[in-house]
Image: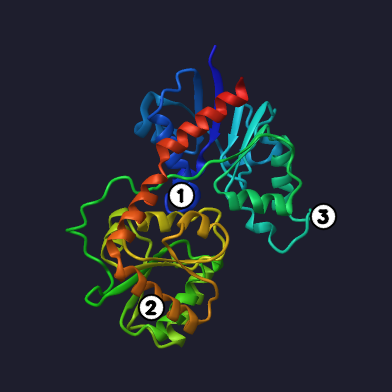
Amino acid sequence: MRKTVILETHNIKNQYTGFGVFNHGLISGLSHHDHSNLDIVLLAYKPSVLKDKFGNAFRYKKIYSFNRYKNFSVRKKHDLWHSVNQNLKFEPKKVSNYLLTVHDVNFAEGSSREDTTSKRKKLFIEKLNRSSAITYISEFAKEQTHRYFNVPNVPEYIVFNGNPIITIANTSDYKPNTPVDKPFLYSVGDFLQKKNFTSIIQMMLHVKDFNLIISGDYNKPYGEEVKKCILDNNLSDRVFLTGRICETGKQYYLQHCAAFLFPSRGEGFGLPPIEAMKFGCPIFLANCTSLPEIGGEYAFYWDEFDAESMAAEFYKGMDTYHNNPDLYRQKYAERANFYNWDKTAKQYLDIYNSILR
């Protein structure tokens, strides 16, 4: 008799966020593998959309917003529940086997293990305590979790994300909404404080021979801070925001940029750098959280974020890259291809079967 595995996948609707990309990548990877011994059920707000895309590879069930509340918890029978990120409020009424995937616990930064007053920490502790096994998307995510929480003695696994860019888009007809007549640097991500975009904007005061283009939905409080930083530094003619970007547009900028910049202070993994590596341009990252682990030895790193030192490290890295560009392109391609959703999905299937044995 097949065992039933339920994945709560409502975040798949948010394709411009890391959780949305994770949901889509994992499900797509699972659909490419034989899992006929398992009855995998996807919970979503619009299950018909998933069925149109993935067909009979899975079963699909609708969930509702009120299922977030304990009195209306999901009652679907299952043998294994996979909570695909640490922030999910949708939970099963009865817990059988429970797999928790942890992306990061940035919400716990600055607190102690004894501090359990916040709702997010309480929710996460409940998830930890019901877990039969835990997966982390990086060694950093595991280390961070153990730093701030008492993790139960259950099997733990590191399962890296895959690279969202599988095929290279034809960008020949793409019309950018920013000037690209001058060499430019590129960054992309959610407009959240931890992304630290203002540091690379201020760096541009000392990097006169390039423009800077940043993609992402800036209609958020941090977006206002970013726009103010551009204005206050008189950089409106050199720093440009595209707004939310489509896949073709993102690949256009990655193909044509002189370098990719990602100064984020809070990544459990960091998908944009491995996307950029697909195109072989120099990669500059913050030397913190998971980024050194994911970026590897051929990326360039900022240890501090004052504008002058960032500019100095940028020019030093550009010189190093251009002294041997073929080597860097080769190493970036190898690393970009190492992260693969089919491989990630196979690891999850192995974990499902291990838990259910």
Please, what secondary structure does the residue beneath circle 2 have?
A: helix
Tag count: 3
Q: Name the disc covering residue 14, or none.
A: 1
Q: CA distance from mark 3 to mark 1?
A: 33 Å
Query: Which mark sits nearer the N-terminus, 2 or 3?
Result: 3
Res. 32 in view: yes
**268 up-or-down from 202: above or below:** above
Tag 2: Cα neighbours inside 10 Å, few (<14), some, or many (≥20)? few
Horizontal placement of 66 versus 271: left or right? right
Q: Which residue is mark 3?
A: 114
Horizontal placement of 36 versus 147: left or right? left
Residue 17 percent across, percent down from the top left: 47, 53
Front in this rendered view, residue 297 or 127? 297
Which amino acid lies under the numbered mark 2 shown in the image of this protein? Tyr
Which amino acid lies under the numbered mark 1 shown in the image of this protein? Asn
Q: Which residue is mark 2?
A: 315
Query: Which mark sits nearer the N-terminus, 2 or 1?
Result: 1
Residue 224 percent across, percent down from the top left: 49, 74
Front in this rendered view, residue 224 or 179? 179
Which amino acid lies under the numbered mark 3 shown in the image of this protein? Glu
Res. 77 in view: no
